[in-house]
DNA sequence: TCTACACTCCAAACACAC
DNA sequence: CATAGTGTGTTTGGAGTG
C-alpha cells in the first residue's frame, strides 16, 4: 500500500450552489459577489463557466464584470449558506474509511490515504460528493500536496475528465515548460522577480541555485521556490483542527469617509464586531491592529500589543482607537479594518 | 562610560491564497 | 478606469538587552 495525497476541489463552487437553488440559471452566465449589485464597490466571488468565457474571474470588480458580460445574472454572496454546504462536502470526505482530511477553504480539501488505487478512491469521492450534495468536483492525485493541488487544474472541466495524477514520474513532462506562476505559492510579484533573473519556466526554477535565490529573495523563500520548481512539497496531510491566529473584520465603504469622526466611529463598530467574535470563541486577544485604505488605494496597517490579553469589548474598542491615532493623514478613507491577534503559542 | 556585536522581540510591509 | 474580505507566513528594520 502506498501513501497518496488527493486534492478535492469543487467546480465553480459558489455559482454551482446558487444554480442548485435556482435551476433555471443552469447554462447562463452567473456572477456571485457583494450584494449582487454590479454598480457597487465589490468583486466577483465566483463566476460560472459561461461567465468565465467572457473573461469574468474571481477578484474582478463587479463593475468590470458587468461591462464584460452585460447579460450575466448577478447574485449576492450568501456566505452562511456556502459554509453549510461546504460542511456537508467535508463530512462526505471524512466519511471515507481511514482517510485524513485537511480543509483548505469552503471549496477544497486535501485527503491523505493509503491505497494502491488512488484513481478508484478519487472516483469514489466524486461520486459520493455528487450523490450527497449534487455538486461536482475535480480531484488531483499526487505523491505530495503540491503535486496533488496542481494536478487538480488538469482534472477540471474543459481541461480533463475529473481526475488527474501528477507525481515525480510526469512532473517534468507536465510542468517543465509552464510559467513559474503556475506553481502554488508563486504569485505575480514573485514571478516578476524571477523573470528579472532570467527564470521564466518551472524547469529553469528547478535548475536555479538555491543559495543565489536565497541571497536575492530571502533565506527561506529562495530555496523554497527552487523546491517548488522541482515539485517538492509536504507529503503528510494533517487532520488536526486548525487554531486561528487572529480574527478580523474589514469593510470598504461605498462612499469614502471624509470626516475623521466618522472614521473613529466605524473603527469602534468594527472593534465591537471583533470583540463579539473572540468573546464567542472565549479567546482573549493579545494585540490589536487597525488597517486603513486611503483613496484611491494605498493601504497601511498599524498595531499595538495590549497591556494584558482581553476580550472586553470596550477595552478592545479603546485600544483600536488608540492605534488609529498612529495615522496622521486625513485623506479620504475607502476601507477600515480591525484585527485581533491571539497570544503566540 | 562608550562602542561593537549578537541576539531577541516587535512592528510594519509585503506576498499569497481562497 | 476599477480593484472584497479573511487569514497566514516571511522579511526587514528598529528597539531593547547583555
Image: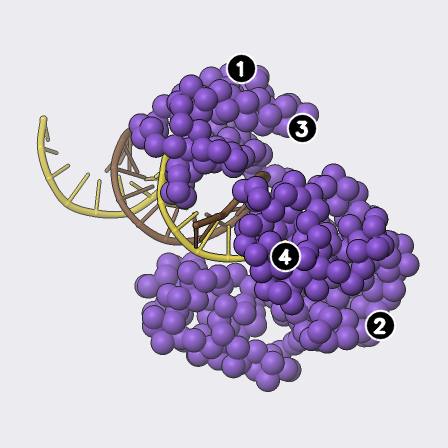
Chain colours: A purple, B yellow, C brown
Chain of the residue under label 2:
A
Camera-near label (1 vs 2) is 1
Q: Observer-nearest residue: A14 or A246? A: A14
The reply to whether dot 1 and dot 2 touch (C-beta < 8 Å) is: no
Tag of residue A329: none
Tag of residue A314: 1
Tag of residue A70: 4
Q: Residue furthest front?
A: A70
Q: Earlier in the sequence, mark 3 or mark 4?
A: 4
Chain of the residue under label 1:
A
Marks 2/3: CA distance? Answer: 40 Å
Marks 4/2: CA distance? Answer: 42 Å
Instruction: Using a 10 Å C-alpha cutoff, classify the residue at mark 1 as few (fewer than 14 neighbours), some (14 to 19) or many (20 or more).
Output: some
Task: Tell me which residue sits at (61%, 39%) in the image.
Answer: A244
Camera-near label (4 vs 2) is 4
Marks 4/1: CA distance? Answer: 46 Å
Asked if residue A202 shows in the view, the reply is yes
Amino acid at each position: 500500500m502506498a501513501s497518496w495525497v488527493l486534492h478535492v476541489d469543487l467546480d465553480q463552487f459558489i455559482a454551482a450552489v446558487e444554480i442548485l437553488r435556482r435551476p433555471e440559471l443552469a447554462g447562463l452566465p452567473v456572477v456571485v459577489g457583494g450584494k449582487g449589485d454590479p454598480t457597487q464597490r465589490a468583486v466577483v466571488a465566483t463566476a460560472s463557466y459561461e461567465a468565465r468565457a467572457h473573461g469574468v474571474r474571481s477578484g474582478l470588480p463587479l463593475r468590470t464584470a458587468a461591462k464584460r458580460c452585460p447579460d450575466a445574472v448577478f447574485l449576492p454572496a450568501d456566505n452562511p449558506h456556502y459554509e453549510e454546504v461546504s460542511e456537508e462536502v467535508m463530512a462526505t470526505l471524512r466519511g471515507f474509511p481511514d482517510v485524513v482530511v485537511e480543509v483548505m477553504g469552503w471549496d477544497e480539501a486535501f485527503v491523505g490515504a493509503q491505497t494502491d488505487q488512488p484513481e478508484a478512491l478519487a472516483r469514489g469521492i466524486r461520486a459520493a460528493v455528487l450523490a450527497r450534495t449534487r455538486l461536482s468536483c475535480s480531484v488531483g492525485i499526487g505523491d505530495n500536496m503540491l503535486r496533488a493541488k496542481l494536478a487538480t487544474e488538469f482534472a477540471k472541466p474543459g481541461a480533463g475528465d475529473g481526475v488527474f495524477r501528477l507525481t515525480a514520474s510526469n512532473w517534468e513532462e507536465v510542468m517543465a515548460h509552464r510559467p513559474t506562476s503556475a506553481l502554488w505559492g508563486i504569485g505575480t510579484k514573485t514571478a516578476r522577480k524571477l523573470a528579472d533573473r532570467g527564470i521564466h519556466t518551472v524547469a529553469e526554477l528547478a535548475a536555479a541555485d538555491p543559495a543565489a535565490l536565497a541571497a536575492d529573495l530571502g533565506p527561506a523563500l529562495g530555496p523554497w521556490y527552487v523546491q517548488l520548481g522541482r515539485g517538492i512539497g509536504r507529503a503528510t496531510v494533517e487532520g488536526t483542527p486548525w487554531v486561528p491566529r487572529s480574527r478580523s473584520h474589514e469593510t470598504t465603504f461605498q462612499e469614502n469617509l471624509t470626516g475623521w469622526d466618522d472614521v473613529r466611529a466605524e473603527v469602534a463598530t468594527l472593534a465591537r464586531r471583533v470583540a463579539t467574535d473572540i468573546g464567542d470563541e472565549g479567546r482573549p486577544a493579545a494585540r490589536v491592529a487597525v488597517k486603513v485604505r486611503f483613496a484611491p488605494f494605498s493601504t497601511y496597517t498599524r498595531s499595538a500589543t495590549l497591556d494584558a490579553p482581553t476580550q472586553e469589548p470596550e477595552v478592545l474598542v479603546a485600544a483600536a482607537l488608540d492605534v488609529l491615532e498612529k495615522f496622521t493623514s486625513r485623506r479620504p478613507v475607502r476601507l477600515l479594518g480591525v484585527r485581533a491577534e491571539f497570544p503566540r503559542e
